[in-house]
Image (cartoon, grey):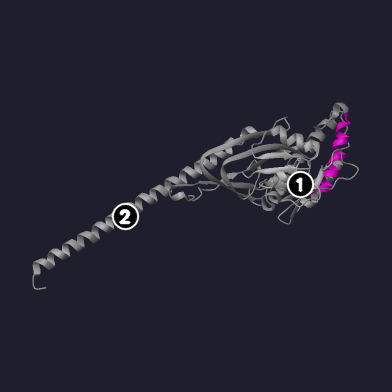
Amino acid sequence: MKNKKAIEMGFNWIFALIVGAFVLFIAVYGAFKFADISTTSVNTQTSAQLIGLLDPLETGISTGESKQLNFKKESRIHLSCDEISNKPFGRQFIAFSEKSLGNKFSEPGERVQIKTKYVFAENLLQGKSFSVFSKPFEMPFKIADLIVISSEDYCFYGAPNKIKKSIESLNLNNVVVSKDLSNCSKMTSVCFGDYDCDIVVKNLCDFNCEEPYEIGRVVKENENLYYTGDLIYAAIFSNKEIYECNIKRLMNKFNELSEVYIGKINITTSQGCSSTIALPLTNMMQASQDVNSSANLINLYKNSQVIDATNQGSGGCKLY
């Protein structure tokens, strides 16, 4: 205690250790911070690339397209939807993250906007492989392509022939059609009819339907999602929030396209092509503006069938 030199040396060592530890902490913190920023940047770029990968799924005149997205690491796709902003079409947001060191998921990158596509899925998808397919949505003319993303394994039971053939033609790695319900025990079961399954599809068709289950409702997690035509696939593979939001976005696009077609009617009428579609199409536009849930689709679909039948019988004066 009386040796002042010993005390001075001890203090210098302690001071050096403290400064060294602080410098080391700053270096490590900076490295991790840089790594976080770099990871966030890469995840954001991946989200943007994912949107680009959806472009080839535009169906054109085909009945459906499909592809597989594969990643080296366990990954997550975060999806959300907003029908209010970016009027009149609304928008969606997609973000990406993957497992990093420590077997933990990194923070998602910045959300990237999707303005011109209609993506149906769960809010959070996870896996190394994602199945993606598209179906055209027509009511009565083509409005958009429905893009569906899934990562879980699904088993369809009791599906009518048209839906069975449609699913099989897509060659999806994570969807099977089975004749035995017991084969669906380890997958998300999708049953057509009165069965105790994860997802149940109810037929709401009346005598006007050309095919069974052309109109119906999908029951999942005690929620009802109503559909018409190929919207059945969107309802099966997405959650209520995403589905209902995109229904409103689709109705907004229907209105915009209808304005174009009404303008076309005015032009063709002046050229000698009389049309009786203008009034029912205008009425359908007004009805579509009141759509606040998928339950309102049924009556709209029936109106669209009448318009389509009139159009098909117009000979050389078809509107679409």
In which quarter of the view is residue 10 placed? bottom left
Q: Nearer the viewer, mark 1 or mark 2?
A: 1
Q: Secondary structure at mark 1?
A: strand
The amino acid beneath tag 2 is Ile
Q: Are marks 1 and 2 in contact (CB under 8 Å)?
A: no
Distance Cα–Cα, label 1 vs label 2:
57 Å
231 displayed left or right of 173: right
Tell me the residue that label 2 is attached to: 26
Quadrant placement of the C terminus = top right
Q: Which mark is residue 191?
A: 1
**Relative depth, front residue between 78 and 118:** 78
**Relative depth, front residue between 141 and 130:** 130
User: Can you give x and y, in whole percent of width and height, for residue 273 in the image?
Assistant: 86, 29
User: Can you give x and y, in whole percent of width and height, for residue 226 in the image?
Assistant: 77, 49
N-term-proximal mark, 1 vs 2? 2
- Magenta segment boundaries in residue numbering: 297-314
31 displayed left or right of 140: left
Q: Residues within 10 Å of mark 1 (few under 14, many from 20)?
A: many
Give the residue displayed 70% in from the left and 31% down from the top. 60
User: Can you give x and y, in whole percent of width and height, for residue 18 in the image?
Assistant: 24, 61
Quadrant placement of the N terminus = bottom left
Q: Secondary structure at mark 2?
A: helix
